[in-house]
Image (cartoon, rainbow, N blue to C red):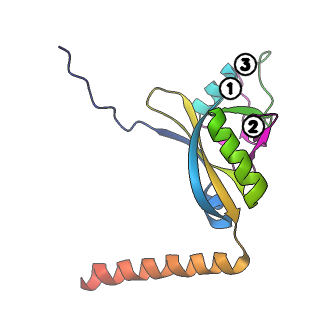
Amino acid sequence: MAVKQKPTDNNKLIAENRRARYDYAIEDTLECGVVLMGSEVKSLRSGGAHLTESYADVENGELMLINSYIALYPQARNFGHEERRRRKLLASKREISRLWQAIGRQGMTLVPLKMYFNDKGRVKLLLGIAKGKKKADKRETEKQRDWQRQKARVMRDYG
């Protein structure tokens, strides 16, 4: 009987939206797949993607990633892709309806946090269900981060 090997953590990070955690309070996260063309996957393997100005929305019962940037793949001359096209996200109908209700009723938004390759080599997107922060909330987050940093220094030096 063959021994099953434990899957390793081979998640290769493609792009991360670090600004999202500063601008939004992340309530919940959701992992979903992305429908891509071949030239987009090749471009992602070489690391050409940005999520900084993108967001997700529910349109006609489908979850869409809007305004994300995937660079052109130079070897795909005739069969390339648009850099900022709308891309369909793969999620179950139950998850899509839950997201649609959160967006409509509670005034939340869907922010892509990071894009990565999973263990099987498929592109996954981590979406955050988020509520926008006010300026005072951002200052409070900055204070907490500074305090944690100072506390770690004190513990390292005197602990």
Q: Name the residue under label 1.
A: 36
Label annotation for residue 76: 3
Quick check: 26 above or below 121? below
Q: Is residue 54 magenta?
A: yes
Residue 80 percent across, percent down from the top left: 77, 21
* Label 1, residues with CA under 10 Å away: few <14, some 14-19, many ≥20: few
Which of the numbered marks, if any, corresponds to residue 54? none
Q: What residue do we see at 63% from left, 40% from top?
A: 95
Q: Which amino acid does label 1 sit on?
A: Leu
Does label 3 or label 1 sit earlier along the sequence? 1
Residue 26 quadrant: bottom right
> Which amino acid type is shown beneath numbered disc 2?
Met
Judged by depth in the image, the label closer to the viewer, 2 or 1, is 2
Identify the secondary structure beneath mark 2: strand
Between tags 3 and 1, which lies in front? 1
For label 1, the SS is loop
Q: What span is colored magenta in the figure?
A: 47-75
Which residue reaches farthest left? Answer: 1
State the image quarter where residue 61 is shown.
Answer: top right
* Image side of residue 21 versus residue 84, left or right: left
Residue at mark 3 to residue at mark 1: CA–CA distance: 14 Å
The residue lying toward the viewer, choosing from 63 and 75, is 63
Q: What element carries label 3?
A: loop
Residue drawn at the location 79% of the way across and 34% of the way down: 86
Q: How crowded is mark 2: few (under 14 residues within 10 Å), some or many (20 or more)?
A: some
Q: Distance between the residues labelled 3 and 2?
A: 24 Å
* Location of mark 2 (residue): 64
Q: Is residue 60 above or below residue 154?
A: above
> Is residue 53 a member of the stretch shown in magenta?
yes
